[in-house]
């Protein structure tokens, strides 16, 4: 977020769905400077995720638009960093089929 000049107090991670990909729908992740009017905003304290974070650190925020929420409701967004792979894992109970790379699905 710092590289994109986005304030951690106002901005967050935008998580959404777009049409396309090998299975029909693709996950879309990017930083956004602020939530939109109808977004659902989820906030997670840094202390909850990392006990060494200072108490005054701003919360991590995730923005989800109403259309994407239909497909993302109940999904777990996990981050994995291993020798073989580094990136987000989408564990989505709404997915009926997904591609091998894990970045697209159908519902």
Image (tube, rainbow, N blue to C red):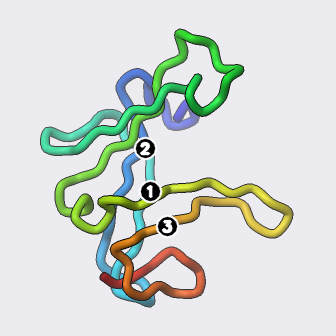
Q: CA distance from mark 1 to mark 3?
A: 15 Å
Residue 46 image position (x, y, % from top left)? 56, 26
How packed is label 1: few (under 14 Cα within 10 Å), some, or many (20 or more)? some
User: Residue 81 appears in which quarter of the rendering?
Assistant: bottom right
Pointers 2 and 3 in contact (CB under 8 A)?
no
Secondary structure under tag 2 reads strand
Give the labeled residue for mark 2.
13
Q: CA distance from mark 2 to mark 3?
A: 17 Å
> In the rendered structure, which disc, 1 or 2, sits on the residue that comes first in sequence?
2
> Is residue 64 shown left or right of residue 31?
left
Pointers 1 and 2 in contact (CB under 8 A)?
yes
How packed is label 2: few (under 14 Cα within 10 Å), some, or many (20 or more)? many
Nearest the viewer among 102 and 19 is 102
The disc label shown at residue 18, or none: none
Residue at image location 44% in from the left, 89% down from the top? 22
Secondary structure under tag 1 reads strand
Residue 101 image position (x, y, % from top left)? 59, 81
Give the labeled residue for mark 1.
29
Nearest the viewer among 80 and 48 is 48
Give the labeled residue for mark 3.
91
Q: In the picture, which quadrant includes the C terminus?
A: bottom left
Pointers 1 and 3 in contact (CB under 8 A)?
no
> In the rendered structure, which disc, 1 or 3, sits on the residue that comes first in sequence?
1
């Amino acid at each position: 977020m710092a590289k994109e000049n986005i304030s951690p107090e106002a901005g967050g991670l935008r998580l959404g769905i777009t049409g396309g990909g090998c299975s029909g729908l693709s996950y879309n992740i990017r930083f956004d400077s602020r939530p939109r009017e109808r977004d659902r905003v989820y906030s997670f304290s840094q202390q909850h995720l990392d006990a060494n974070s200072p108490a005054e650190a701003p919360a991590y925020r995730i923005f989800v638009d109403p259309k994407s929420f239909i497909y993302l409701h109940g999904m777990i967004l996990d981050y994995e960093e291993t020798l073989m792979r580094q990136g987000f894992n989408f564990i989505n109970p709404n997915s009926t089929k997904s591609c091998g790379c894990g970045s697209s699905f159908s519902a």
